[in-house]
Amino acid sequence: MTDLAPFVVPNLAARRASALVRSIVRTFLFGLIVVWSAFPILYVIVSSLKSQKEIFKFPPDLLFTPTLEHYVSLATTWNGYFATLGNSLIVAVGATILACAASILSGFVYSRYTNRLLAGSVLYLIAIRLLPPIVVTLPLFPLVDALKLSDTHFILIVLYATFWVSLCTMIMKTFIDKIPRTLDEAAMVDGATTLQTLTRVIFPLALQGVAACAIFVFIFSWNEYLFALIFTTQHAKTAPLIISEVMDSVSGTNWGVLFAGVTVQLMPVTLLVIFAQKFLIAGLTAGSVKG
Amino acid sequence: MLKRILATAMLVAMAGTAMAQEPRTLTIISHNVHKTAATGGDLATAQNIAGEWAERNNVTLNWVTLDIGPLHDRLLREMSLGETSVDLAVVLNTRVVPSVARLLEPLDDLMAANPIEDLEGISKGLLDATAIDGKRVAIPYRHATNAMLYNKAILDERGIAVPTSLDELLAAARAATHVREDGTRVHGLIITAETHVTPLQFLSAFGATYIAPDLSVHANSPEMIAGLTELAKLHQEGVIPPNATTYSLDELIATMREGRGVFAINPFARYTALNDPAASLYPGQINAIPYPTNVAGKSAANTEFWSWAIPGNSTQKELAYDLIRELSSKEATVRAALNGNGPVRPAAYDDPRIIEKLPYAAAEAVGLRDASIAIPAFDGAVEATALFIEEMHGALLGLKTPEQAAADLQTRTEALVAKSK
Amino acid sequence: MKRLNPAAMLMLVPTHLLLLAVIAIPSFYVFWLSLNESTYGTGLTFVGFDNYWTVLTNPYFWRSALNTLIVVNAIVYIEMAIAIGMAALFIGGVRYPKVMFAIILMPYAISEVVGVLVWKIMLNPGSGVLSRTIEAMGFGMVNWSVSPPLALGVVTLISIWHHLPFTFLLIYAGMLAVPKSLYEASRIDGATGWQEFWRITMPLTIPAILISLIFRFVFAFRLFSEVWLLTGGGPARLTEVLALYLYQSAFRYGDFGVASATGWLMVIGSLLVASVYLWAMHRRMLKGND
């Protein structure tokens, strides 16, 4: 927006000065955001490389000899950890795909069709999420057990996806709302079915929304604790359960190992975010085409 | 129904074939410390008691470890089902209450058929607390008895003698409180007032009892008021950390390891963690002794303990009981203690292997001798701890006078006990 | 806008089937539980609305309701303001977008429990890195552990820190989806950046804002870990919030009737708190968008 300014306003020097101020303020704000977001995380990552004695030292050592001892003991003492990471991955990917697929379908319908009942069901979609999940586990536990679904990846995938379909449906709806109807009408005229219109025309243009939904569902499923605790024992046990065992209330938390585990656990999510960011930007360019 | 027919068909098909060779799976739900006690975990000197039993009996152990809160939640949910896959579980003493005992398998018949070696050798207080309405529902396995832990290096540095009575302890804690040159505060006494255990221990040295085993409530006693008054004073003077009410076990451990605390109330077994050369700035300098009272020769020791129990809806009760029997034998008790367990048989402390391995063995034996259970098992036990924490916080922070807090605690707990009876 | 047809209804099936099976039907059962007395391993004893009466006459319930109301509103609105500001900043262009996104989303990526614990370690009065730095700067000791308002302030701070990426991402994605052509048109008309923001960006981001507001209310209302791990509801139960109250009755005292009743009261409470936005959303739906 600033690059157009010189054309319009004659007072060049003043404009440049204000552009400079603006750029300084922007840089400062970005810096602030980075510190705010990253400081506690850096604390975790740096601590994971310190020996147990150095972790809580004040003032903290900024220069220290990094040690991988906590990662080693994570792999040896807590040898279940890496196996459970595999379970976490299966569950998180499964839940992400299921939730995104279901929400694209329903988001499309909520965006394109009108019906009094449909409008009312939006409220239902939200209201149903108001009951705290912990109470819902009361009836779910015996139900899942009776269906012999306890300790399976399947049940966690279904549960996690369900917790997010409401929100993801709403997200997909708002994104699809912004895609001009003329596009799907044109596709229909060309003989495409509703489903084809959705997958070929709408989906590529709604990628930002899909990316946002995927990030939310994945992160949630990757870190979820309560339901994993209640519905798994061995076979489908996820990584957060091991992390919680490291935070032990009988013999005390093993901080070094905890921080190492958390650092390992952060990595896939960070990769996902970097990957998904491409789609957010892809959506941006798509956005310039429509309208 | 179909399931049952299928199962029967399977059994018939398998009868007489290689069925006996098929290893059975026994699912155990416990905290990690019990697994370590029974198997030695990854200790170099591991005594794999449960593992040896499993091999002898052709059983695969499926060990599910959880933290305390989740452990009981999960166990209770499992026991509410028609049938559970959990065969064996540990329960904390405050959870062995009538409403839970209903869901546990009474062990008396199993014990009559196949007795546990020298049952009377297990501490009587612990045995009594695990028999509900005359039925034995659990076998004590691990105790955590509170001690006075102190940093010898700091005491020496400041010329303070190791206290032998409660008054001396309070004076020493005050004298030990100081600010180091770099601005670090060193607190004389560390308690974890986030929960009820260590404050109750502090108060018990004054002779205060919250709820007696016969469920009479003594919250409004002069001893309790004296203890609460002292607690508030220590907090005001900064002897106890300013954030004592949010102090967790983790903070206590960190504080003691870094020499920011001089005396601490915690179980004897904490000795190992506090002296760990890899983590502590004072390895070998933190001692554990019986918590003194003003009565010579008598220590104050609140204890918490864990027991093995079998869910009433388990399908392999005999097998599970056989493992309990194995783990409760005299020899297994000693071997588990070598794995770091708090042995529930006082005689174990006389075993030379234990005397050699645990520097605090003699002190803990004294502690266990004087031990009393912090809160007796009744249906309102968990709620009673919450009441205590609330009123104790009120007194400690000066939101209420100690007298008022004690009186309120008395009234509310009496109502709770009456309701639970 | 088209009339709902069978093909479209079929596309709604996955979403509604999941919700029905996992949440809706169990929720009705929870309502039935709330009319009964029960605990682990017992049958149900019908008691009518007794459990609701028990909860509603309990002063601790009302204190935790008040705490929840204050904290939830603080969290949601402060977070929203920051998120909108941040999204606007990012829309104006960002260098190293991949790295920036990875950093910004990190607080959300870390598990809630660990996030809270790390903040607690850093803020521990007298020993935490942050609190000692604050002290070294001459501001004295900030002992939030004995002051309910301060403790709830820290809870608000941590909750915002943890969830800001969620709100930011929704709003940023919403702003990104505003068609470029609109900005081009307004620039030709000589609008300043500020005017563009208020006339184009904001109005077109309202749906995204509405959704994130509603869902943040939903999530914030069951705020648990922050309080549980920081203060445990103390000192003297002064910082308790509704989810904590519920957790105690359900899983520590095993009173499923009271827990279920509290759960349903929380539904009503959050409906009331978010009602304005829900109503706005419903109206937009009825109008058929745009």
Image: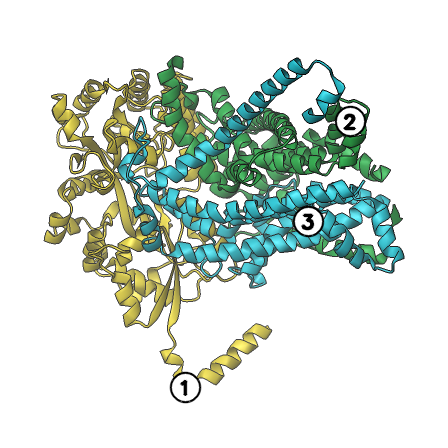
Chain colours: A cyan, B yellow, C green
| Image mark 1: chain | B
Circle on res. C24: 3
Q: Residues within 10 Å of mark 1 (few under 14, many from 20)?
A: few
Pick the quarter of the image with the C terminus of chain A.
top right
Mark 2 chain: C
Name which residue lies at 28% across and 62% down: B50
Q: Are marks 1 and 2 on the same chain?
A: no
Q: Position of residue C15 (x, y in %)?
A: 71, 52
Residue A94: percent from the left, percent from the top? 59, 57
The residue nearer to you, when weighing A98 against C133, is C133
Residue C237: give x, y in percent of width and height.
Answer: 47, 27
- The image quadrant of residue B58 is bottom left
According to the picture, the residue beneath numbered tag 1 turns out to be: B16
Residue pointed to by mark 2: C187
Give amino acid for label 1. Gly
Question: Taking C240 as reference, is A172 above or below it?
Answer: below
Residue B218 quadrant: top left
Can you see residue B217?
Answer: yes
Q: Is residue A249 above or below residue C123?
A: below
Numbered badge on residue C19: none
